[in-house]
Amino acid sequence: MISRAIRVFCGICFLFIIELCPKSTRPIVLIDPAGHAKNLGRLLVEGYERAETLKLAHAIKERLLRKYRVRPVISRRPGEEISHRLQIPSFSNRLGADFFLRIHMYREESEKPKLFLYHLLFHPMVDLAVLDRKPLSLIHVQQAHFGSIHITRFYGETMYDYLNQELFKKYFDCFPLQGLPIASMIGITAPAVLVEIGICRENKWKSLVGPIVDSLRFLSNMAS
């Protein structure tokens, strides 16, 4: 009876100590593959964008888990329908994503894959201005990216600097980060970069998983 009481007391003390210890949280990386149940996406060679971007998203997720102390989350499941344009941005914001990575693919005629990097930008003079926002103030959905746009550009340029190294140029071409009014990126508050990949064959994306994940070097500094 006494030993049981001691075990219970020790258990309570252990739980109390755990509650007092600071909880380490892993940064959340939301991977958003283009397409969904009712949107096949662009025609590739043998299949469609929807299937290949999801495969790539899972490959990136697995490699992220091995390389960084982050929590990667994929925005959709096989067969899931995205019913509204703001469904994914809303999910990202509620999840509290620390970085948002959207993936697109298209059919490229040349043998060497091509990588394009984009971020949301409507007007440089407006979007890049430093604004003094009041706490809890309402923000228009088309201005949600204002607060993180400078970090987004830093992350995107970091990715480009890595992917544009001489050692990769014989395997793929990477083009500088560009800002465009991309509808699928509207409403996201987290730093968000879109990667568009041009491939001549479906399995060509497999060689890009390592370089893409390695280009996300800034994730190492996010982890607590």
Image (tube, rainbow, N blue to C red):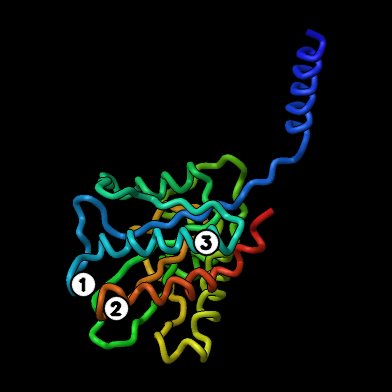
| Left or right: residue 189 compared with residue 58 | right
What is the C-alpha distance between the residues marked 3 and 1? 26 Å
Residue 82 is situated, as x and y percent measured from the top left of the image, at 28, 47
Q: Are marks 2 and 1 in contact (CB under 8 Å)?
A: yes
In terms of depth relative to the viewer, which is nearer, 57 or 191? 57
| 42 over 115 or under it: above or below | above
Mark 3 / mark 1, whichever is N-terminal = 1
Q: How far apart are marks 2 and 3 (CA)?
A: 22 Å
Q: Check disc 2: other Cα within 10 Å, few if <14, some if 14-19, many if 20+.
A: many
Residues 204 and 147: in front is 204
- Picture residue at 23% right of the left edge, 85% below the top: 109
Q: In this view, does 190 lie above or below 113?
A: above
Residue 148 shows in the view: yes
Circle 1 — which element?
A: loop
Residue 24 spot, x, y in % from top left: 68, 46
**Which amino acid is tagged 1?**
Leu
